[in-house]
Image (cartoon, rainbow, N blue to C red):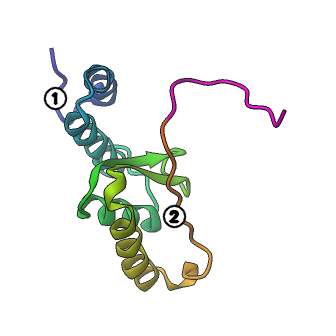
Amino acid sequence: MQAKSGSFFCENDRVQRGVEAWRKGDLQTFGQLMFESGESSIHQYECGCPELITIFNILRDCPGIYGARFSGAGYRGCCIGLVDPAYKDEIQSRINAEYPVKHSEYAEVYKVYFCKTDDGTRIITDE
């Protein structure tokens, strides 16, 4: 049974569906669930500061983004996106063109990071 969009259990349902989509390699579905989680954070949980909501909206409308959501509870945490690496430069350019205009007080200090996913946790040493 799938939870209704406004119910308390929506995020748990999304997580369960997300696990299944990830196992299947279905990035389209996984990404859509990420976007739904981001929208839920803004509208159901009323979290997300204006700066994070701006980043979320940029990512939502940017080519090469499968999905995006807040991390760190959305209260001045960060916004993460699942991206197609082929669009990395375009994504960076879009954020650089839009974010500083809307939040000029952070124009010199905001950062965008791209990283690769990995399979599990392990200790990495310099040896």
Which residue is found at the position 22% from the left and 41% from the top?
32
Residue under pointer 1: 4
Displayed quadrant of residue 5: top left
On whether residue 23 falls in the magenta region, the answer is no
Labels 2 and 1 touching (C-beta < 8 A): no
Which residue is found at the position 67% from the left and 24% from the top?
122
Prevalent SS, magenta region: loop
Residue under pointer 2: 112
Q: Quadrant of the N terminus?
A: top left
User: Among all residues in the image, which is located at the extreme top?
Assistant: 1
Instruction: Kindly identify the amino acid type of the residue bearing the numbered disc 2.
Output: Val
Displayed quadrant of residue 108: bottom right
Q: Quadrant of the C terminus?
A: top right
Q: Which residues are magenta?
A: 118-127
On whether residue 121 falls in the magenta region, the answer is yes
Which residue is found at the position 26% from the left and 36% from the top?
27
Q: Earlier in the sequence, mark 2 or mark 1?
A: 1
Q: Indicate left or right for 114 with 37 as reference.
A: right
Displayed quadrant of residue 9: top left
Q: Report the number of discs.
A: 2
Q: Indicate left or right for 46 with 32 as reference.
A: right
